[in-house]
Amino acid sequence: MTTFETYLETRNGTVLDDDLVVVLRNIAEATREISDKLRTSSLDGLTGATEITNVQGEAQKPLDILSNEIMLEACRRSPSVSFAVSEELDSEVAIHGDGKYAVIFDPLDGSSNLDVNVTVGTIFSVIRASTSGEILKNGRGQLIAGYAAYGPQTTLVLTVGKGVQIFTLNADGVYLMTSADAKIVPEAKEFAINAARRSSWDDAVASYIEEAIDTGHNMRWVGSMVADTHRIFNRGGVFLYPADRNKPASGGRLRLLYEANPIGLLVEAAGGAAIIGTSTILDIEPTSLHQRVPVIFGSKNEVDKISAAYRERIVEAAAAE
């Protein structure tokens, strides 16, 4: 099997220059360290929550804080990194004054699941940004996007400009390539949505879910974006976290820069689709570091059905005026 290090050394058909190789190597090392910390967290007293809240207003867990510091240290070890942007921090952090790449990450996605031993993950992307003013760019500007899923296995899923590669961490702490060109099947009778929020769904989502149930689709919902994404990479289907129509000002639940954009790039690179209504996620221009958006992604044919439902609602609304 191809090791992650061998993959970095070849870099054929990718955007990786020598500086980006160092960045990606250090990010991979950070995910290995986080995986180790998670494995012994209950033994090391790292479970539960702290009294600290992050910029999102969410109570931080000890492993949120630790994972964030591990990712920041990976950035510090990378001379070409200019800034780091994290879910856990109010604003961007300056790393190296002469750096040219910003690393954007959610250090521990799904951490509310930690105490019940459910799969969590790290989501990340790398963009070109020498100044803080260059950080807010749409998802097409991502050079690297990926996530690490920490479950029964630790897997690293990434795209660097040519398809999607999946690596699995072995017992010796070495990432081995287990898929050289991962693809999301175009359709599958499975959807992931929080059905408890049904009363807040817009009509397009509600109609799709109703039809999906009527045609024998199964529902899956982990409550960890990385876990739900990894299932879609393996089995197909669609993930939906729509906006709350009762709270339109909120914009959505998931964050554009370090959740929706990296996952969106991965999904598109694997042949899937990722949308916000009738727009693709990767074309949305961000307005703030922690901007929230509704998110729908997965098997292309399923996502296309939902996009068509949104277009139908727009036509109906225009006709009613």
Image (spheres, rainbow, N blue to C red):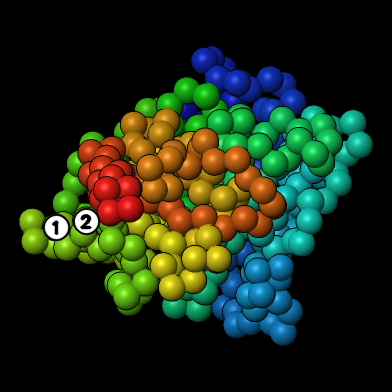
The answer to which of 130 and 304 lies nearer the viewer is 304
Q: Position of residue 73 (x, y in %)?
A: 78, 50
Q: Is residue 133 left or right of residue 249?
A: right
Q: Position of residue 285 (x, y in %)?
A: 60, 40
Q: Position of residue 115 (x, y in %)?
A: 50, 78
Q: Is residue 202 above or below residue 178?
A: below
Label ID, residue 208: 2
User: Residue at image x 72%, y 84%?
Assistant: 51
Q: Is residue 150 left or right of residue 255?
A: left
Q: Is residue 111 above or below residue 47?
A: above
Write down the quadrant of residue 199 in the picture: bottom left
Label 1–label 2 contact, CB within 8 A:
yes
The answer to whether residue 179 is seen in the rendering is: no
Question: Mark 2 belongs to which amino acid?
Answer: Tyr
Q: Position of residue 251 (x, y in %)?
A: 53, 60
Q: Secondary structure at mark 2?
A: helix
